[in-house]
Image (spheres, helix red, strand yellow):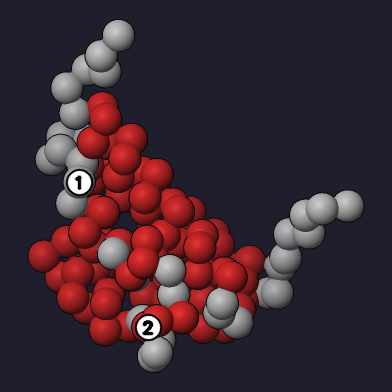
Amino acid sequence: MAMPPGLNEATSCAYLLMRGIDESHLVLDGATKARLLEGGRRPLADPVHGGRLHRRLPRPRSVLPEVALRLAQWSALASSGIGPRVVETCIAMAERMADRARHGFTVRTGF
């Protein structure tokens, strides 16, 4: 069964955005990650300004996975109808993640 029009794009957009904000935890300290997550709100919400988001990324950028480097591109995937809601949800998650990163919250896996 096929997805309704626009649902595949919205799903891809949400997945890639969430993946992008989550993947940076592998290589960044908490303070840097919090700064990036908080600083991405406007550029992410307005893909025209995606270059601003890219300029906020730490150097060398090669330390970040590609999915994290392309957040502005991912935010443009969803249709204009649902896209803003998908991006707002991702921004809300990024803000919560920034707060956790700032306070040194970690998740332990593998008992």
Quadrant containing the N terminus in the rendered view = top left
Q: Position of residue 52 (x, y in %)?
A: 22, 78
Q: Is residue 48 left or right of residue 66?
A: left
Q: Which residue is mark 1?
A: 77
Q: Position of residue 25 (x, y in %)?
A: 57, 69
Q: Residue at x 40, y 81 (%)?
A: 62
Disc ID at residue 1: none
Determine the secondary structure under disc 2.
Answer: helix
Q: Is residue 37 left or right of residue 57?
A: right
- Residue 90 higher or lower than 57, as above or below: above
Asked where in the image residue 74 lies, by quadrant, the reply is bottom left
Q: Residue at x 31, y 40 (%)?
A: 12
- Residue 108 higher or lower than 89, as above or below: below
Amino acid type at image mark 2: Arg
Closer-to-camera residue (109/33): 109
Determine the secondary structure under disc 1.
Answer: loop
Q: Is residue 36 left or right of residue 11?
A: right
Q: Is residue 3 visible?
A: yes
Closer-to-camera residue (17/38): 17
Amino acid type at image mark 1: Leu
Give the foreground label among 1 and 2. 2
Q: Position of residue 63 (x, y in %)?
A: 46, 81
Disc ID at residue 61: 2
- Residue 4 higher or lower than 55, as above or below: above
